[in-house]
Image: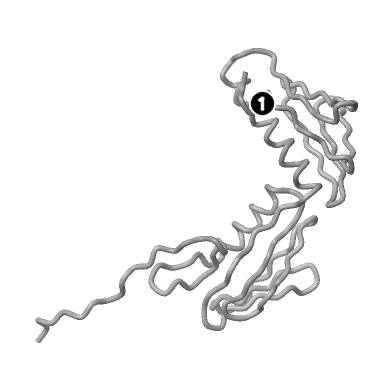
Amino acid sequence: MSRIGKQPVKIPKEVKISVNNNTLNIEGPKGKLSQTFHDDITITYNQEAKQILVNRPSDEKRYKALHGLTRALIANMVTGVTVGYSKNLEIVGLGYTAKVQGKDLVLSLGYTHPIQLEIPKGLKVDIKNPTNPAKMTISGSDKQLVGQFSAVIRGMKPPEPYKGMGIKYEDEIIRRKAGKALTSGAA
């Protein structure tokens, strides 16, 4: 069996679960999540043991992959509705700013116009310092949505290797390059 897939997913007391066909609905203190999984993978919820078990029909390679994937996705959903996920971003650059206006995130990144991004439903954007270096936290219960929105923001102005200007993750290390070097033999 799959090492990850065979492990049961433990369910905390404050989480409510319902399984309908292969659609799993999870509700917890941080929000609600719902996802439909592959029809060949069976999901069973044991209320007495407060755990979810995932089973596959055979030992074919694709079922082994789906087995571990399904269990990992369910575990991420449970963690998301209980603890939540967050990503920290830094915006480094002279004149680069970030602010939240209503349901939009407005970024000023040195272009001729400010960039407006609609904040997806279920996510929260907190800006700790609006100017250089601007620090923001994107948080929510859906791990995939938090990561995707963070990647979209980072893609607006990736960090460059000479001065390190741009948007980067807080724990990201940028490999710096040396600038132009003056040669001593120039006449």
Image point (74%, 35%), residue name = 74
Place residue 11 in its image quadrant. top right
What scheme was used to colour the molecule?
Answer: one colour
Badge 1 marks a residue whose secondary structure is loop
Q: Where is residue 10 in the image (x, y as percent from the top left)?
A: 78, 34
> Which residue is nearer to you in this view: 117 or 49?
49
> Which residue is nearer to you in this view: 96 or 87?
87
Image point (71%, 53%), residue name = 85
Image point (70%, 75%), residue name = 99
Pointer 1 local density, CA inside 10 Å: few below 14, some 14–19, many at least 20 = many
- Up/down of 84 relative to 168, above or below: above
Place residue 160 in its image quadrant. bottom left
> Which residue is nearer to you in this view: 38 or 173?
173
Quick one: which residue is furthest to the top in this view? 58
Please state which amino acid type lies under the numbered disc 1. Gly
Image point (53%, 67%), residue name = 157
Q: Position of residue 137 (x, y in %)?
A: 68, 65
Q: Mark 1 points at which residue?
A: 5
- Up/down of 13 relative to 44, above or below: below
